[in-house]
Image (cartoon, grey):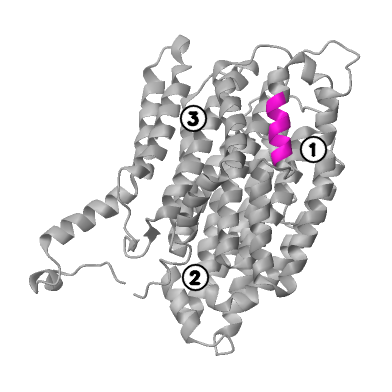
Amino acid sequence: MNLLISSSQLFQGKITPEDLDNLGKIEWGALWPAWVASLGILLILMVDLVLPQAQRRLLAWLSLLVAIASGASTFITDYSKTPLFQGMVAADDLSRFMAVIIFGTVALAIMASPDYLARLGIEVQGEYYALILAAGCGMWLLSIATNFMILFVALELFSLALYILVGFLPRSLRSHEAGFKYFLLSSFASAFMLYGIALLFGAYGTTSYSGLRSQLAANSIHSQNGLLVLIGLAMLSVGFAFKISAVPFHMWTPDVYEGAPTPITALMAVGTKAAIVVAFLRVFNGALEPIAAYWQPILYVLAIITMIGGNLLAMTQTNVKRMLAYSAVAHAGYILIGIAANNPSGLQGVLFYLLSYSVMTTGAFAVVIALEGPRGEGLEVADFTGLGRANPWLAAVMTLCLLSLGGIPPTAGFFGKALVFSGAVQAGGWQLILPLVGAVTSVIAVFYYFRIVVRMYLVDSLVKLPLARRTAFSLGLVLLVAGVGTIALGLLAGFALNWVEQAAATVGQLVAISK
């Protein structure tokens, strides 16, 4: 469907002026979250110039309002079921679903930041919050892209913001090293992705998902351009595997997660992964669906080695942020199971997994923020010893999040894994191996998650713990949202699944519309 309206069409009466007005309203209104976030960034930077030093903490609350408004604005427009801006972006239920996850995560990262920055003695700066909002805007645009050009521009938008945020700590060499390492390796992966896009464009002369899908459906992969398509597919797979932290392209993850400011680590672990996964779905399960037989085996292998590698490496960690980083790697493997299944059950499982993963991972990192020392030094597993007595509130939230990450019923994590596993079971064939490997590695994961739980409740500390300090109000809100969300998504999973089903039904639907 070509949405470019010519004057001749208008004069011939095929499209009325009212239709044209409505189309314009729908197109611009569909991007409300991006407009609100962009205007909010400008407002924060301007307010930062005139706000007295004593009132700088107001920047965090202003940024929070912008993030909430950005996510909420997606509900003020009735999204159409057609591609917009000449097939560049999609305005559908999945777009709305991602606005809630991404800007919700941005809001939680902002709320977790004031206490963290104050404890490190870092002066509150408007550009810090502006960059967080810019990253969130880029993540959302990536998730709604239906053209490779928009995909790449959005990818670079949030990547550039994260490069700066990862290295934001002024007196931390580890933070600077993490930022530089993330910049180099991420740029390298982006080059792979861009080269893959170029090869696909060279094969069929289009960068739109709908155009590529039509060409792949009409032409055999064994035709003259088949080799270009396969090489382009391989390049795209490498780029996406790096961004999602799949083994063996995960090497950057533990170092970057450990060195970055912890609120930014939480944003990367949740927001970045969610945006990349949905872009993954739109490209592979949408645009490249006609050649699924060629990319599904790649995802089978990636899923298996990612689940095994991520969990085994997490077992050996004593630093909590590195352990959670390798845990994020392992969870990427579980998500890949649902993507590889390429059926409605698997897609629903992926989206529910993202929803549950967002609250439980944010909660775990929020506890880490609450317990980190005044210099932001790495928190070890041993530092949780006796936390159940020193701070029962933090221990309870951490326990809930770890149980959910481990997939223990009736938490949200259990239903997320069950759904992606059921997608693989329905697909049958070789895919039956994936839930089997997933079940075994989930047992391994329970070991290193319960290692922290045991230390919190069953091991007495020999020294007085400096962990019972009062939790800041804003950080307490993050902990409350994460704790309640983890329980609610588990006990009331049916309500969330209705929304997830609507969002999953749109994957590939828009790119399947012919021009």
Where does the image place residue 81, in percent across and percent down from the top left? 34, 61
Mark 2 or mark 1: whose residue is earlier in sequence: 2
Q: In this view, does 24 lie above or below 265?
A: below
Mark 3 or mark 1: whose residue is earlier in sequence: 3
| Residue designated by label 3 | 129
The residues bearing labels 2 and 3 have C-alpha atoms spaced at a distance of 35 Å
Mark 2 residue type: Ala
The magenta segment: 396-404
Tag shown at residue 180? none
Mark 2 or mark 3: whose residue is earlier in sequence: 3
Residue in view at x 69 percent, y 66 percent = 425
Instruction: Please identify the quadrant where the C terminus is shown.
Output: bottom left
Where does the image place residue 21, in percent across and percent down from the top left? 16, 55
| Residue designated by label 1 | 449
Q: Is residue 384 above or below residue 229?
A: above
Mark 2 burial class by Cα count in 10 Å: few <14, some 14-19, many 20+ = many
